[in-house]
Image (cartoon, helix red, strand yellow):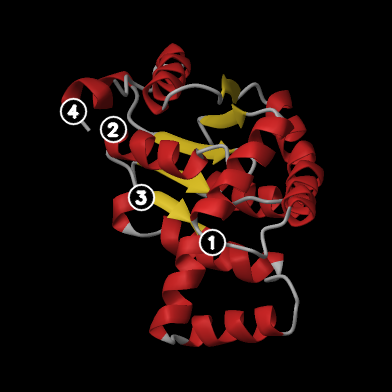
Amino acid sequence: MTADRQDQHPTARLLIVGPQGSGKGTQGVRVAEALGIPVVSTGDIFRANIKDGTDLGKKVTAILDAGDLVPDELTSEIVRDRLSQDDAATGFLLDGYPRNTAQVSHLDDFLSAQSAALDAVILLDVPREESMARLGLRAVEQGRSDDTEAAIAHRLDIYENETAPIISEYQERGIVDRIDGVGSLDEITARISAALGARGIGQLV
């Protein structure tokens, strides 16, 4: 992060949200790299711990093997630990957390204890039909026969049901930037940059 950006906005505590196939993973990395902050992805943290065979990884594996979801409190504990590390002191970009209103409360409690709060929520707005088409194409390219149209639709249903209450809550706080998620990678990044720039968070491009 340049000195100019630090003068403009000393922190950038962000959340990126979007349906599967919205490109939020790619855009999240672009935003984080431009602002000099880490991406904090619960999925990545879980996968790394499972791969390394840590105690956390074994605990998560047992939960997933039983067909259950990782409990909110355990997920929040993992995120709190990650956000307490030095590289997240001046900001971070959350991807995949919070997923529900309980996790929103956990995050609020953690940040308020530091006299902090989220600066912005980047919502990548992609029509359902576009998400279906992108995920269907990706399934073909990756040879994922289990990614049927019904399975993709089910995942999008879960996203819509879980995310709507979160977005409503953050909209009431006035921190949601709804970004048109259809276009080239550079076009979408430019839209995010303009929205964050309007909040004084800095230019990405």
Relative depth, front residue between 75 and 156:
156
Which residue appears at 29% of the width and 20% of the height? Answer: 205
> Do tag 3 and tag 2 residues touch (Cβ < 8 Å)?
no
* Front disc: 1 or 4: 1
Relative depth, front residue between 183 and 98:
183
Q: Secondary structure at mark 1?
A: loop
Label 3 to label 1: alpha-carbon separation: 37 Å
Q: Earlier in the sequence, mark 3 or mark 2?
A: 2
Q: Which residue was labeled with disc 1?
A: 143
Callout 1 amino acid: Gly
* Front disc: 2 or 4: 2
* Front disc: 3 or 2: 2
Q: Which residue was labeled with disc 4?
A: 2
Query: Tag on residue 88?
Result: 3
Label 2 to label 4: alpha-carbon separation: 10 Å
Query: Tag on residue 93?
Result: none
Label 4 to label 3: alpha-carbon separation: 16 Å
Label 3 to label 2: alpha-carbon separation: 15 Å
Label 2 to label 1: alpha-carbon separation: 33 Å
Q: Secondary structure at mark 2?
A: helix
Callout 3 amino acid: Ala
Which residue is outermost to the left?
Answer: 3
Residue 47, how many percent across, how many down? 48, 71
Q: Quadrant of the N terminus?
A: top left
Q: Earlier in the sequence, mark 2 or mark 1?
A: 2
* Front disc: 2 or 1: 1
Q: Which residue was labeled with disc 2?
A: 34
Residue 3, how many percent across, how many down? 17, 26
User: Label 4 neighbourhood size at 10 Å, few (<14), some (14-19), many (20+)?
Assistant: few
Q: Earlier in the sequence, mark 3 or mark 1?
A: 3
